[in-house]
Structures are given as structure tokens and as C-alpha cells.
Image (cartoon, rainbow, N blue to C red):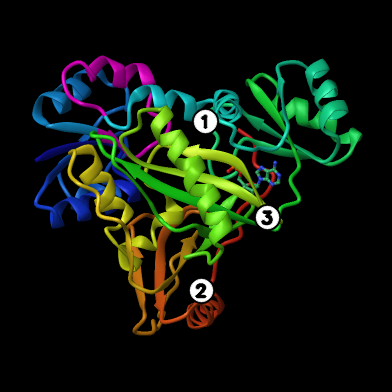
Amino acid sequence: MRIGIIGAGQLGQMLGFAARNLGMQCQFIDPTPNPPAAVCGPVTQAAFDDSDALARLAASCDVVTYEFENVPVAALQKIADRVPVYPPPAALGHAQDRLAEKQLFLQLDIPLAPFHRVDSPDDLEAAVAKLGLPLVLKTRRLGYDGKGQFVIRRPADLPVAWQLCGGSELIAEQWVNFDYEVSAIGARNVSGQVICYPLTRNEHADGILQTSVAPLQDTALTSQAEHYISALLEHLDFVGVLALEMFVLGEQLLANEFAPRVHNSGHWSIEGAEPSQFTAHLLAITDQSLPEPRLLGHAGMLNLIGTMPENLRLPAEATLHDYGKASRPGRKLGHITVIGDSATARDALLAELRESVTESIPVSGTVP
Ligand code: AMP
């Protein structure tokens, strides 16, 4: 089986390793020279919407997928009549626009924080009147890792927020005083079979994921999350892995956003579950049966951001993943997974690792 992957970053690399274990061959398109996934297969250095490169990929692969959320939908649609493209380009379209995404949550009865579309300074005033302060102003498109976001805390912030963000299509969201954040990861194959991973609890700093732990031991929240993710997978006629990020407020889940791809908060599954999210994605897009995920312990994942730690001594329960990327503040360069026999053992391992890893502090309040 030949898999074409648009994007050759760390997600492409981890897909490539999983593909190798399944006896599949991967080839990639990516505009950057020597990207992380180059160790897994040939990379055509081209823009994500380069029609010639995409046509060649379509001609030489059995199925095409993507690891990057901002691939232009129109570019995927152009090759979708020549080769199966999964997840379906229409699903990607929903995820690329925060407004369409939130309207979809409403349509599917998935609870979320109140929001308001903002196209003008008057809309922003109306958003403050409707949602109160603080609120989060976000660009509707092309945001990731908290980029393209501005927290408005007091009326005096409004002109600055508009100066920095105005000009893009925007959305204002009510500030959620959440207890903690979780993500639900699910997969659906071409035949419609669905599997769900247990809920993962996530910690972010300045919009960037720092740590994840799984499984979250809360059966009520887990079954709510399974219900929401299954509704999304079915409605979008989705094929592949989808991650739904949510806020937890008491006993309630509020959807934040979904990613139509393998997700950073599921990296623990490489060592912590069988199949991993990467294997599940490949099985799903090649229409193979999806085994119910079997947990191999209590997993924790720590992102390595900005600089790779030097002379790190890892305990036997830990695995280091180095994506082979150059250092840059705020950049995800690798991660470490730990597997414990219990949640307490896992948390202790993670706390110890956190102490020994020097993280660059990402710049806060980033705007596009
Ligand atoms: P996002 O890019 O929407 O995933 O946001 C990145 C992170 O910013 C989230 O994981 C939260 O930690 C925080 N955040 C985003 N939206 C809100 C909100 N409405 N209320 C509180 N925190 C938020």
C-alpha cells in the first residue's frame, strides 16, 4: 500500500514510522527543506497547493492523507477524483474556519461557549455586550498553538485588539473558567467502523500543549466525549483520526475545536496503546478493521519546546522522541512519553521529568 502524505513535519514522521511497521510505503509533499518525515520516505519539496506535485502524488499513491491543517481544500478537491483523499476535504473545510466549526457543534448539540462573529469594531462592541469580559478574540483561519489570539480583559483593550487583529475574519469567544482541558481522539474507517481512545487530560501554557496524561478516569465525561466525537465522525462521513479539544467545567464538557488529523495530545498512544493513533489513522484510511484501543499502562507525555534538553537521563519507563528540528522559541522539537503502572506512578515520573527539562517560555499574546 502506497500512502501519500501532504506535510512532512513530526506528525508525518510518526505516521511514517507507523506505516513502516504496517509494511506500507510513504511519500510526502512539504515546502521546507529536509523536514522531519524525510527519514521515512521521499519528500517532494513543493508548496501544499502545487498542482503538479499533487498530481504526481495522486498518480503514484493508493490513498492520500494530510498531517497539516492548513492545506487548501481546493487543492485536495482537485486530486480527489483521481485518488481517495482522507479525511474528506469537506471535513477539513469545517475545521479551517472557527465559525463553521462552532456552527457545526451547535447543529450536532455539542455544548460550547457562547461566541460572536466579528467583522468590524461595532461587532466587537456587540461581542463585549453579549459575552462580557474577559473574552478571547481569535482569527477564524490559520491559527494554531494559540497564535492569532488576543484576550480582551477590559474595555481599554478594545482598540489595541482591533489594531492587532482587525483585517482578518474574527470570532469572539466567551472566556471559559475551565477546571481543566481534555481531548477526545477517535477514528473511523472507510466502512464506517468507529473507535475512541480514552479521554486525555491536557495542560497548555500560552496556547501551546505542554503535557498530556491518559486515561482520564471519569466514566461520565468519557461517555459524553465518545458521544460527541462519534456524532462528528458520522456527520462528516469522516475517515481517519479526529481529535476534539474540550474544556471541563464541573461535570460538563464544552467543545473548543477539532483537528481533522492525528494530534499532539495523542502522542502518548505510541507507547501507551495498541493501536497507536498513527496506526489507527493508517488502518482507517486503507479501510482495514480498527481494533478497540488496548491500554498498556498509565501514559504521560511531555512536549519538548524551544530547545532540546542536554544530558537528559531518562528512567526506563520513558521514551524520547526527537523530531530532528532546529531550535526556535515556542517550537515543538520532540516529546517524552512515560508509562506508569498507576496514575500516581505516572504523575511522579512526569513531575520528575518536568523538573529536569528546561523549556523555553513561548512569547505570549501572539497575533498573526
Ligand atoms: P485554541 O487555539 O482555540 O485551541 O486555544 C489554545 C488554548 O487557549 C486553549 O487550549 C486554552 O488553553 C486557551 N483558550 C482558548 N479559548 C479559550 C476560551 N474561550 N477561554 C479560556 N481559555 C481559552
- Mark 1: amino acid: Leu
Q: Quadrant of residue 128?
A: top right
Identify the residue position indicated by label 1 in the image.
142
- The CB of the residue at mark 1 lies under 8 Å from ligand 1: no
Quadrant of the frame with the N terminus: top left
Residue 195 painted magenta? no
Q: Earlier in the sequence, mark 2 or mark 3?
A: 3
Q: Residue at x 39, y 55 (%)?
A: 326
Q: What amino acid is at disc 2?
A: Val
Q: Is residue 216 above or below residue 234?
A: below
Identity of the residue drawn at 62% across and 35% down: 148
Residue 154, position in %: x, y?
A: 89, 39
The answer to whether 25 is drawn above or below residue 354 in the figure is: above
Compare marks 1 and 3 and give the one earlier in the sequence.
1
Q: Position of residue 142 (x, y in %)?
A: 52, 30
> Where does the magenta region start and end?
65-85
Q: Which mark is residue 101?
A: none
Q: Earlier in the sequence, mark 2 or mark 1?
A: 1
**Image-based side of 151 in relation to 321, left or right:** right
Would you call the spot at circle 3 few (<14 residues within 10 Å), some (14-19), or many (20 or more)? few
Relative to 237, 58 lies left or right: left
Q: Examine the rendering and report whether any part of residue 330 can be seen.
A: no
| Residue tagged 2 | 357
Q: Quadrant of ligand 1?
A: top right
Q: Are marks 2 and 1 in contact (CB under 8 Å)?
A: no
Which mark is nearer the camera, 2 or 3?
Answer: 3
Identify the secondary structure beneath mark 1: loop
The residue singled out by tag 3 in the image is 251
